[in-house]
Structures are given as structure tokens and as C-alpha cells.
Image (cartoon, rainbow, N blue to C red):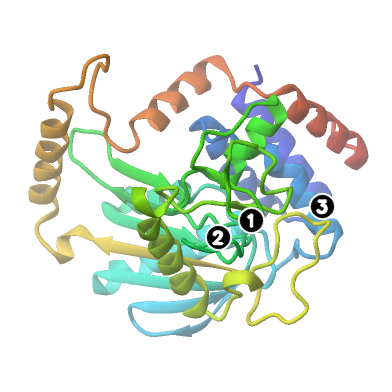
Amino acid sequence: MFTYQHLLSFTENILLAIGHSKKDATLGAKVLLSADLRGVDSHGVARLSGYVRLWEAKRVNAKPNIRIVHETPSTAVVDGDGGLGLVVAPYAMKVAIEKAEKVGTGWVSVKGSNHFGIAGYHSMMALEKDMIGISMTNASPLVAPTFSTTRLLGTNPISVAIPAKTQPPFVADMATTTAANGKLEILQRKNLEAPLGWVQEKDGTPTTNANGVKDGGALLPLGGDREHGSHKGYSLGAIVDIFSAVLSGANYGPWVPPFVAFLSPPADPVGEGIGHFFGAMRVDAFRPADEFKEHMDKWISTFRKAETVKGQDRVLIPGDPEREMEKERMESGIPLLPPVEKDLRELGEKLGVAF
């Protein structure tokens, strides 16, 4: 087990070592560690060496000029200038919140960015202002549309955070695939098989091989196959891609740059970097905030009291498992798989940062 503060400090020092400012390194470390705290281990410090490799390949700008390049009172396009998504995304979400404060809602599409960690961190920024937050991003093309063997979409997550009054907030944070690629990476490290419906082989045959994507196969949209609604997961992933990239001028579909540094981005890009999309909605732009939050409490309480199926203790509200995990890991520490710990130690040795 490692304390949150230990891993936060290490991550910050790694980001400083590759040229980030103190402010950006602190923010980037906080965003990254929020994944580990909330139990989304696939998107936390396990990805730190991947970010460093992207920087070494000159695909991450440690000193980006993040800026608004187009805007209206309620919308904006932000250019991340090749910066770390962990830094670019909070900037863009802050713009959305500031616009919502002025005119009721704010919508920001981003180009020229990189992987932004967990979507939930960014949507939850709006909760501090009594707003509803929305965040999404496109990602490396590892997902085949329903009825296809061609990888055209990313795991393209969506997160929505909604405030309540006395109840904890509703926080949905999900990939539009049956499982995020990071979950596969964890299975690979543990030498375990993947559940059926997560992956297909190169020829489209369903498989439980956790290395199926590495072997030329593809992740499957949420639903797994047409009979279980994969066309709906495909549609959700497509919406994220369009809002994040076609709208902003980022790369979309098969042109999204791969997260792994050993693969080069497509030689014929259709945009700039990876794209994100953020929304902030002031609750009182729709109805009195206290009134809304009282009804959110009632909504949440009603679902919590729902009768459970045999063998289950309770009905969960989106955000419950992550919030409980965050409390536990703040107190007891964050576990790291041996390959992740080894990777971080080697990274620290390479960059002169003690682990």
C-alpha cells in the first residue's frame, strides 16, 4: 500500500522532471491520482510512464499555450497546444463553468490535447459551483463499430455529475465500450481472461483473450453484440467522437493519435491532437437550486430504497462505489500491482526522482 500523498508527490516530481511548471505538475498529479483514489486504477499512476514516453516522443508539450481560439457567450473552442490532457481539460472545464456563471450554461470543445485521465474528475468540478457538469473525450481507435472488424472509435467515455442537497452527488463515469482498455491492461498484468463480450478477434470472432486487441482484434461497443444492444454503445461512442473532435477541429475516428508512444500518429491527420467536450449548467438557470437539490435527494433516496434482487444488499447510485473507495484509500492507502510498482520505480530511476 502507498499513501495518496506519497504517490501524489512522486507524480508531481516526475511531471516537474519532464519540464512542467509547478502549477501544471501539481494539477496534473492531482487529476491523475483522483483515478487511483476512486478505484479506477487503469487511469491512474499506471499510466504515468505512458505520458512520459509521449513526452519523449515529442507528442506532449510540457509548456503549452492553452487558449481559447473561438467563442460566443455560452460556447468556446480551446486549443490545448499539445499539452497534457490532465492540464488542458481542467482549463477547458473552468471556461465552461465561467460561461455558465454568466449566461446559465457553458459548452467547450477542445482540440490539440492528449489523454485527460478520468472523465469524472472534470465533470465533478462543476459540483463546487452548484452546477451540473458533463465531460467526454475521444480516444485511440481500438473499438470496432457493430458489424465491423475495423477499429474506428475509442473507448470514448462520458461523465455527468449532478449535485444534491443532503445526499452525495450523482456521478456517472463510464466508457461507451463494454469495458475500458485499461481494464484489459489490468487483466493482462494478472494473466487473466477477459469476459465474453469485451473483445473480438481480428476476424470478428468473440474471444476471452485479454490480449485480443494487441493481436489485431478490437474492443466491443457497450452491449458486446447486436442482440445485446451494441448498436447503442456504438452510437454513444460516435456522439462523443463528434462532439469532442469534429466540433473542435481535433482528430476523429481512425485518425486519433494512439496513446502508446511506440505507434506513430496517422500520417494524414484530419485535425489537431485528441478532442474533449465539456458542459456546465447552472441549476438555477432551470429552476431554483434548493428546490432542484431537494428533488435530487428524493430521487436518490427513492432509488436507494428500491427492492433488491436476491443476493444483493442495496441498489447503488452512480458514484457510490467510487466515493466509498476514495474514503477507504485515503485512510488505508492505494494498492499497486507489482508490474506497476516496478514500472514506477524504473521511471523514477530514469528521471532522478526517488520512489
Q: What residue sits right under mark 2 in the picture?
A: 144
Q: Nearer the viewer, mark 1 or mark 3?
A: 1
Query: Which secondary structure, mark 2?
Result: loop
Q: Is residue 88 visible?
A: yes
Which residue is found at the position 52% from the left and 47% from the top? 118
Q: What residue sits right under mark 3 in the picture?
A: 53
Q: How far across and down, in percent of the image, does residue 253 sit? A: 57, 71
Q: Nearer the viewer, mark 2 or mark 1?
A: 1
Which residue is found at the position 85% from the left and 61% from the top? 57
Can you tell which mark lies on residue 136? none
Given contact means CB atoms under 8 Å apart, are the residues at marks 3 and 2 in contact? no
Q: What residue sits right under mark 1 in the picture?
A: 203
3 or 2: tag closer to the N-terminus: 3
Query: Which secondary structure, mark 3?
Result: helix
In which quadrant of the rendered image does the N terminus lie? top right
2 or 1: tag closer to the N-terminus: 2
In which quadrant of the rendered image does the C terminus lie? top right
Q: Is residue 5 above or below residue 72?
A: above
Marks counted in the figure total: 3
Q: How far across and down, in percent of the image, does residue 170 sit? A: 28, 42
Q: How far across and down, in percent of the image, does residue 306 sit? A: 13, 27
Q: How far across and down, in percent of the image, does residue 354 sit? A: 84, 30
Q: Is residue 15 above or below residue 308?
A: below
In the image, 230: left or right of 293?
right
Inter-mark Cα distance, 1 to 3: 31 Å
Q: Give the residue type at disc 3.
A: Arg
Inter-mark Cα distance, 3 to 2: 26 Å
Query: Which secondary structure, mark 1?
Result: loop
Q: Give the residue type at disc 2.
A: Ala
1 or 3: tag closer to the N-terminus: 3
Q: Nearer the viewer, residue 262 or 278?
A: 262
